[in-house]
Image (tube, helix red, strand yellow):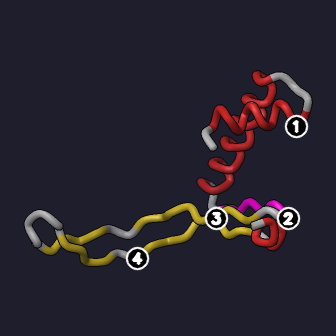
Amino acid sequence: MTKQELVNKIAEDANISKRAAEDALKAFISAVKESLAKGESVSLVGFGTFTVSERAARKGRNPQTGAEIQIPARKVPVFRAGKGLKEAL
Protein backbone atom coordinates (compact mmCIF):
# COMPACT_ATOMS: atom_id res chain seq x y z
CA MET A 1 0.00 0.00 0.00
CA THR A 2 1.38 3.38 -0.96
CA LYS A 3 1.00 6.57 1.06
CA GLN A 4 -1.70 7.82 -1.31
CA GLU A 5 -3.63 4.55 -1.04
CA LEU A 6 -3.42 4.83 2.76
CA VAL A 7 -4.73 8.40 2.62
CA ASN A 8 -7.64 7.25 0.42
CA LYS A 9 -8.45 4.40 2.81
CA ILE A 10 -8.36 6.69 5.87
CA ALA A 11 -10.60 9.23 4.12
CA GLU A 12 -13.08 6.53 3.14
CA ASP A 13 -13.17 4.77 6.54
CA ALA A 14 -13.35 7.98 8.59
CA ASN A 15 -15.75 9.68 6.17
CA ILE A 16 -13.52 12.75 5.85
CA SER A 17 -11.94 14.53 2.90
CA LYS A 18 -8.73 13.23 1.36
CA ARG A 19 -7.07 16.52 2.30
CA ALA A 20 -8.01 16.08 5.98
CA ALA A 21 -6.84 12.46 5.91
CA GLU A 22 -3.51 13.48 4.37
CA ASP A 23 -3.05 16.23 7.00
CA ALA A 24 -3.82 13.74 9.78
CA LEU A 25 -1.32 11.22 8.40
CA LYS A 26 1.38 13.89 8.07
CA ALA A 27 0.72 15.02 11.66
CA PHE A 28 1.00 11.42 12.90
CA ILE A 29 4.28 10.84 11.06
CA SER A 30 5.67 14.14 12.33
CA ALA A 31 4.69 13.35 15.93
CA VAL A 32 6.35 9.93 15.75
CA LYS A 33 9.54 11.43 14.27
CA GLU A 34 9.72 14.12 16.95
CA SER A 35 9.20 11.63 19.77
CA LEU A 36 11.84 9.26 18.44
CA ALA A 37 14.29 12.14 17.96
CA LYS A 38 13.86 12.95 21.67
CA GLY A 39 14.59 9.31 22.54
CA GLU A 40 11.01 8.60 23.56
CA SER A 41 8.97 5.61 22.43
CA VAL A 42 5.51 5.75 20.85
CA SER A 43 3.12 3.00 21.99
CA LEU A 44 -0.17 2.28 20.23
CA VAL A 45 -1.98 -0.40 22.23
CA GLY A 46 -3.06 -3.26 19.99
CA PHE A 47 -0.93 -2.02 17.10
CA GLY A 48 2.70 -1.75 18.19
CA THR A 49 5.54 0.33 19.57
CA PHE A 50 8.04 2.57 17.81
CA THR A 51 11.39 2.85 19.65
CA VAL A 52 14.98 3.90 19.02
CA SER A 53 17.72 1.29 19.12
CA GLU A 54 21.47 1.86 19.15
CA ARG A 55 23.72 -0.15 16.88
CA ALA A 56 27.30 -0.56 18.00
CA ALA A 57 30.25 0.27 15.75
CA ARG A 58 31.47 -2.73 13.80
CA LYS A 59 33.79 -3.84 11.06
CA GLY A 60 32.47 -4.56 7.58
CA ARG A 61 33.77 -5.28 4.11
CA ASN A 62 33.55 -3.30 0.91
CA PRO A 63 31.88 -5.79 -1.47
CA GLN A 64 33.72 -4.43 -4.52
CA THR A 65 37.27 -4.42 -3.16
CA GLY A 66 37.04 -6.72 -0.16
CA ALA A 67 38.76 -4.05 1.94
CA GLU A 68 37.81 -3.93 5.60
CA ILE A 69 35.95 -0.78 6.66
CA GLN A 70 34.77 0.61 9.98
CA ILE A 71 31.00 1.10 10.25
CA PRO A 72 30.19 3.78 12.86
CA ALA A 73 27.69 3.39 15.68
CA ARG A 74 24.26 4.89 15.03
CA LYS A 75 20.67 5.05 16.19
CA VAL A 76 17.95 3.33 14.17
CA PRO A 77 14.14 3.31 14.44
CA VAL A 78 12.55 0.00 15.43
CA PHE A 79 8.91 -1.11 15.25
CA ARG A 80 7.68 -3.98 17.40
CA ALA A 81 4.22 -5.26 16.43
CA GLY A 82 1.62 -5.51 19.18
CA LYS A 83 -0.56 -8.48 20.04
CA GLY A 84 -3.58 -7.19 18.09
CA LEU A 85 -1.57 -6.70 14.91
CA LYS A 86 0.09 -10.11 15.21
CA GLU A 87 -3.27 -11.81 15.69
CA ALA A 88 -4.73 -10.00 12.66
CA LEU A 89 -2.11 -11.65 10.47
Residue in the picture at 67% in, 41% down: 30
List x then y, in percent, for residue 65. Answer: 8, 66
Is disc 4 surrounded by few (<14), some (14 to 19) or many (20+) residues within 10 Å? few
* Residue indicated by mark 4: 56
* Residue indicated by mark 1: 13
Is disc 1 surrounded by few (<14), some (14 to 19) or many (20+) residues within 10 Å? few
Q: Residue furthest front?
A: 89
Q: Residue furthest right?
A: 15
* Residue indicated by mark 3: 79
- C-alpha distance separating marks 4 and 3: 19 Å
Is disc 3 surrounded by few (<14), some (14 to 19) or many (20+) residues within 10 Å? some
* Residue indicated by mark 2: 45
List x then y, in percent, for residue 75. Answer: 48, 64
The mark closer to the camera, 1 or 3, is 1
Tell me which numbered mark, 4 or 3, is placed earlier along the sequence: 4
Q: Where 10 sits versus 76, above or below? A: above
Tell me which numbered mark, 2 or 1, is placed earlier along the sequence: 1
The secondary structure type at the circle numbered 2 is loop
Residue in the picture at 82% in, 31% down: 11
The amino acid marked with disc number 3 is: Phe
